[in-house]
Amino acid sequence: MEAEEALKESFRLVGKEFGYDSVNAEFVAFREFKVRWQRSYKWASFKVSDYLMDAPEEVIEALARTLFGKIAGKHDVPYSEEMIAWATSKDFVKYKQPVYLRRSRGITKSPKGEVRDLEESMERLANAGLAEKDPDLVLTWTKEKNIRKVGYCSVLMKVIAISSVFDNGEIPGFVLDYVVYHEYLHASRGMKAFGRAHDLDFREDEIRFPRYKEAEEWLNRLCMYV
Ligand SMILES: [Zn+2]
């Protein structure tokens, strides 16, 4: 069966269990891994990230259950184990990360800036015992100098993008290292931290950075936020 037909079928079957007469689902080439939906009382329509196009049937079915559960008002429905296992597999990153990077127009796709090299930051973090080098993790600069947010991390795609504001000799290297460390923590915690990005555990790891306070003061002065 064609992938989209299988998707529709799974969503229809699960939808029926939840009392929906009419269900539609289709794949869409979103940049992010996400699902959008619209619904009325007996009708629901889903736009599902095409990163899921080759997902096994049980993953699609589990996703449908998660989403209909969400719609039914169980707000805390986490991703299913099937989904987490599949989306955190080696193959997932191997095949989806290049697509994600192709769709990401706002990043330079290189760790080397004009002044700073993000790989060097990661090297220092690894040497300090704060990070473990991960060959799948892509470090890149944003093309624009984002002046509010220090950067972002796609946990699933293993991509860390740092604002090119920090590609600047006037901001000390340790401040950049701290920013990379912050995003690295998101990446390394993976999907298990879904929905509680900066919880207590996270903060405890964060303050292991030796010049944490100084780095935070710098960010405050720059009016930039992690
Ligand atoms: Zn953060």
Image (spheres, rainbow, N blue to C red):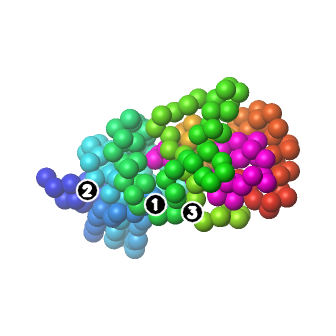
What residue is drawn where x is 85% and y is 43%?
Answer: 213
Residue 52 picture location, percent across and down: 33, 51
Q: Where does label 1 land, which residue?
A: 104
Packing grade of label 2 (10 A; few <14, some 14-19, many >=20) is many
Tell me the tag on residue 39. Answer: none
Return the disc, 2 or 1, that comes first in the chain's sequence: 2
Cα distance in 3D space between marks 1 and 3: 11 Å
Judged by depth in the image, the label closer to the viewer, 1 or 3, is 3
What residue is drawn where x is 52% and y is 63%?
Answer: 106
Q: Residue furthest bottom?
A: 40
What residue is drawn where x is 32% and y is 57%?
Answer: 50
Q: Which residues are magenta?
A: 154-180
Which amino acid is tagged 3?
Answer: Lys
Residue 119 picture location, percent across and down: 59, 40
Q: Residue furthest left?
A: 1
Q: Where does label 3 land, which residue?
A: 143
Q: Nearer the viewer, residue 164 or 77?
A: 164
Q: Quadrant of residue 44?
A: bottom left
Packing grade of label 3 (10 A; few <14, some 14-19, many >=20) is some
Please give left or right for residue 120 compared with residue 63 in the image: right
Q: Nearer the viewer, residue 118 or 180?
A: 118
Q: In the image, is the residue at mark 2 within 8 Å of ligand 1 by its beta carbon?
A: no
> Does residue 26 lie above or below 166 as drawn?
below
Please give left or right for residue 40 compared with residue 176 in the image: left
Return the disc, 2 or 3, that comes first in the chain's sequence: 2
Please give left or right for residue 90 compared with residue 183 in the image: left
Q: Secondary structure at mark 3?
A: loop
Q: Where does label 2 land, which residue?
A: 7
Which amino acid is tagged 2?
Answer: Leu
Return the disc, 1 or 3, that comes first in the chain's sequence: 1
